[in-house]
Amino acid sequence: MDELVERVDSQDRVLGVVSRREAIREGWLHRVAVTVCRDDRGRILVHRRSEQVSRFPGLYEVEVGGAANVGESYEQAAARELTEELGIRALPRLLITFINRSGLSPHWLGVHEAVVPDAVVPDPDEVAWHGWLTEPELDSALLEWRSTPDSHEAFSRYLAFRST
């Protein structure tokens, strides 16, 4: 069954409820929440998506996340996705939101940060591999690995936010 999302406008105001498939097909704005996960040593979690997922199978990602359900805030969606994908409970901190035009369709993207334990247990239906990289290692990896369209945009904005 297709998930329901809130269609939003260019100011991130709710216009109504639609299926995510319809929002993508029609290019309607909706909300997506992602989290950059760091461990207590500052390394960043990177993962490769399972070959079984419908969107971007086998590609690498710097963020963990997905679409916000109807009535969910960015923070609630990010926390739910951390539990679903990594099996952890954390309180991600919303850093920035912006309209992201990379990926399958345009969407509002809420980028969060969370410090998480390095012993995560990813859902094998979602995550085929994961590892912890330093920022320099990640910079090199992003040049070599095929990653999701959101990864480059979200991570570059994340780094810019952190540097201010």
Image (cartoon, rainbow, N blue to C red):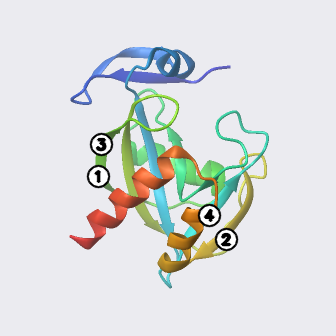
The C terminus appears in which quarter of the rendering? bottom left
Q: Please rate how many residues cluster around mark 3, counting C-alpha atoms within 10 Å: few if below 14, some from 14 to 19, many from 20.
A: some
Q: Residue under circle 2?
A: 131
Residue 37 showing in the rendered view: yes
User: How far across and down, in percent of the image, does residue 154 sit?
Assistant: 41, 53
Q: Residue at x 40, y 20 (%)?
A: 28
Q: Which mark is residue 98?
A: 3
User: How far across and down, in percent of the image, does residue 125 sit?
Assistant: 77, 46
Q: Residue at x 78, y 44 (%)?
A: 51
Numbered disc total: 4
Q: Residue at x 71, y 42 (%)?
A: 57
SS category of the residue bearing label 3: strand
Q: CA distance from mark 3 to mark 1?
A: 7 Å
Q: CA distance from mark 2 to mark 4?
A: 16 Å
- Amino acid type indicated by mark 1: Ile
Q: Residue under circle 4?
A: 144
User: How far across and down, in percent of the image, does residue 128 sit?
Assistant: 77, 55
Pair 1/4: label in front? 4
Q: CA distance from mark 1 to mark 4?
A: 27 Å
Pair 3/4: label in front? 4
Q: CA distance from mark 3 to mark 2?
A: 27 Å
- Amino acid type indicated by mark 4: Glu
